[in-house]
Amino acid sequence: MTANKIITLIIMSLVGVAAFGLIYDIKLLVIFGHIFTLPMVGVWYGVKRQWNTTPIDKVMYLAYFVGSFSDSFILVGGQTGEVLQILTTIFMHTILIVAFRKEGTRIYSDKAKDLPKLLFPTTIIFVFFGAVLMHILPVVIYFIAIFYAVQEMILICHGLFREIKGKSYFWVAIGTSLIFVKDVLYSYHFYISESKILSLYIIQYSLSTLVYFMIAVGMAYGFEDKDLEKEKASWQYIKSQLDLHSKTKRFNYFYKDFVHFLLQMLRKRQVS
């Protein structure tokens, strides 16, 4: 079993520990799971990347370190805990956007097929945060939620507009898109539902871990896809040079034969 598979099992175990603590009201287990789950996702990324220190890698390490505080602040309780968690999540999402930008991702729509990538997240986030939560959230939290919604839209769009293709793209695109689903469950548990539904919070917490795990996996695979593209480009260059050499060699043979033929014709004329 590889190191990354072992770390994946540890991440699942940490989520299970937190869920167990929530069900049986064991605060120590809840705190332990919330503090170490996202940093362990960062460890998974680091092991996968062999602890490289490229600018993107450094930003990703920082994002999952900050994520530890994001999960932990909700345990403070009350409106203070909620505000601290939202603010820390905004900081974490900002760091992830920086990682996408360093990767070369830019949000633009010069083709019709790119419009859904821009319009879909913008529309659903605007409707949910603008229409559904407007009359539910406390004033302070709603004011912060406006900034969170705008940033979430930017984050999801960056995930959908990445130029890297293949499995890296799909891991990140699905992961960033599920952030909205995670936030809907979070909002329903804390603000919409009159009674707290523990099972719903556990699902939301598990989905949150899955979301950020998928982003980490996709970003790690992105480097492999880049290396593969470079390797393909190198082989294509070598092949083109060999083809050129082969064509040049054939031309040289033809040129020599042609010159030889002209010399023979010239000699025959001189003899005659």
Image (cartoon, rainbow, N blue to C red):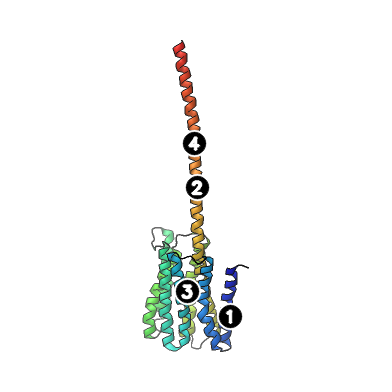
The disc placed on residue 64 is 3
Cβ atoms under marks 2 and 3 closer than 8 Å: no
The disc placed on residue 236 is 2
Image location of residue 50, percent across then percent down = 52, 65
**Cα distance in 3D space between marks 1 and 4:** 64 Å
Circle 1 sits on which residue?
A: 16
Quarter where residue 132 is shown: bottom left
**Cα distance in 3D space between marks 2 and 4:** 16 Å
Q: Mark 3: which amino acid?
A: Tyr
Mark 1 / mark 4, whichever is N-terminal: 1
The disc placed on residue 247 is 4
The local secondary structure at tag 2 comes to helix
Q: Which residue does the image show at 36% across and 81% down from the upper left?
A: 143
Quarter where residue 66 is shown: bottom left
Cβ atoms under marks 2 and 4 closer than 8 Å: no
**Cα distance in 3D space between marks 3 and 1:** 19 Å
The image quadrant where one finds the N terminus is bottom right
Q: Mark 1: which amino acid?
A: Gly
Viewer-side residue, 114 vs 42: 42
**Cα distance in 3D space between marks 2 and 1:** 48 Å
